[in-house]
Image: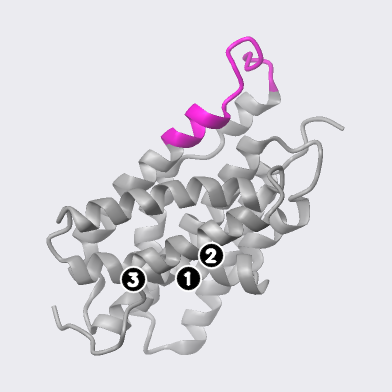
Amino acid sequence: MAQSAQFTTPVDTVVSRMRALDARLPERDGLAVFNRVYLTVTEEFDRHLDAGAFPDRLAAMTLDVRFAHRYLAVAEEGRAPACWRPLLRFRRHPGVRPLQFALAGINAHIGHDLALAVVDTCRTLACEPADLEDEFDRVGDLLVSLEEHIREELMPGPDLLQIADPLTHLLGSWSLERAREATWAAARTLWALRGLPDLAEEFGERLDAAVGLAGRMLLTPLSD
């Protein structure tokens, strides 16, 4: 894989920015809920990177940083594509549970941002999506740990999460594994359409809108 001369922001700089957000945002804020989970996983990625867990360190770091920058543009600068708008709109709604905020953030970030980050990385490193598949899979494995962390930290106790609880149905309506598979297909499609900018833009807009619709459903208030 060709290596880019462009400077790549270190992952620890991204971690510092997420920590600053964590210190600034109110604890119950919906974006803060997602930020805390994402910070945990990014710190874990940084440890894996330092330990040599990624054979192509540059590719893994570039993908992770390009991915994080998509979220940070929303959190720090307010530049929110359609997929993030439901979370920003409902972030202080008292009827939305922390688990919903976390899943809505994951939905937006994986369903939309990760596909664009793959394309960003291919352009940065002058490579094809196929060259990044191993790094995509390894980052995806860490994202699975993100979902597991969410369930451990934010899932109500068994006395609260009964089969009749609406949250049970919401949890069953979204799958990280399916989102990950769809994202890889979307990234390959966007890359294939790079020579057809009008079609690429339309596909990107439709992807953004579809992910945003799923996010809106995940944020359905469950109490007043």
Question: Which residue position holds label 3?
Answer: 10
The CA distance from mark 2 to mark 3 is: 16 Å
**What SS does tag 2 mark?**
helix
| Residue situated furthest top in the rendering | 159
Drawn side of residue 86 relative to residue 207, left or right: right
Residue at the image point whose x is 59% and y is 53% from the top = 22
**Where residue 179 sits: x, y (%)?**
44, 49
**Where residue 100 sits: x, y (%)?**
64, 39
Question: Which residue position holds label 2?
Answer: 71
Figure disc tally: 3
Q: Nearer the viewer, residue 82 or 206?
A: 82
Drawn side of residue 7 relative to residue 90, left or right: left
| Disc 1 crowd, CA 10 A, few/some/many (<14, 14-19, 20+) | some
Drawn side of residue 211 relative to residue 138, left or right: right
Asked if 175 appears above or below 69 in the picture, the reply is above
Asked if 141 appears above or below 182 in the picture, the reply is above
Q: Contact (CB < 8 A) between labels 1 and 3?
A: no
69 inside magenta stretch = no
The region drawn magenta spans 148-165
Question: Which residue position holds label 1?
Answer: 69
Residue at the image point whose x is 71% and y is 42% from the top = 28
**What SS does tag 3 mark?**
loop
**What SS does tag 1 mark?**
helix
The image quadrant where one finds the N terminus is: bottom left
In the rendered image, is residue 130 in sight?
Answer: no
Amino acid type shown at disc 3: Pro
Q: Nearer the viewer, residue 17 or 194?
A: 17
Q: Contact (CB < 8 A) between labels 1 and 2?
A: yes
In the rendered image, is residue 126 in sight?
Answer: yes
